[in-house]
Image: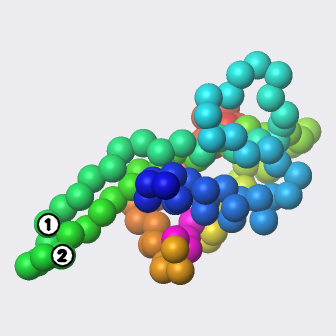
Amino acid sequence: MTTTQKLTDDICLTLAEHFPDCEIYTEKIEQGHTKPCFLVTPEDTSITHTVGRRFMERYQMRIRYLYGGDAPKAECAAVKALLYRLLRDVRLDGAVVHGADMHIEDADSVI
């Protein structure tokens, strides 16, 4: 299993723990999906040489939330606040991966 897949799985486990009523998808969502739900997909990966034999790996993940309630703005605001806290530190193979340069965009109550 690749690091990208492990990271995707660990993010999904974290989301499932804190949002037990949400479906979590890791592939393209087709019509007829359940709301509320998350879509977790890996984007870009980069490796940068730092010092000596050390390298820094960066994994860009896209996490979309599709609301399911009657108050989409309030629901998205609450989810947005919690996502920052949950994804700041993610466990990966017993180590902690730190979220950095996180950006949340609210477009028509979809984050």
Image quarter of residue 83 = bottom right
> Judging from the image, what secondary structure is the residue with disc 2 in?
loop
Horizontal relation, residue 46 to residue 42: left or right: left
- Asked whether 27 or 86 is in front, the reply is 27
User: Which residue position is annotated with label 2?
Assistant: 54
* Magenta span of residues: 87-92
Q: Position of residue 109 (x, y in %)?
A: 70, 37
Secondary-structure class at tag 1: strand
Task: Name the magenta segment's main secondary structure.
Answer: strand
At a point 18% along the width and 75% down the height, the residue shown is 54
Three-letter amino acid code at disc 2?
Arg
Image x and y of residue 41, in percent: 54, 42
Query: In the rendered structure, does residue 73 fall within the stretch colored magenta?
Result: no
Q: Is residue 51 visible?
A: yes
Dividing the picture into quadrants, the one containing residue 32 is top right
Tag 1 residue: 49
The answer, for residue 73, to whether it is visible in the render is no
Residue appearing at x 44%, y 54% in the figure? 2
x%, y% of residue 65? Answer: 69, 43
- Label 2 near label 1: C-beta < 8 Å? yes
Horizontal relation, residue 79 to residue 83: left or right: right
Q: Residue at x 41, y 65 (%)?
A: 100
Question: Which quadrant would the C terminus be assigned to in this image?
Answer: top right
Q: Which of 110 and 93 is in front in this view?
A: 93
Residue 89 in magenta stretch:
yes
Find residue 25 and report its image quarter: top right
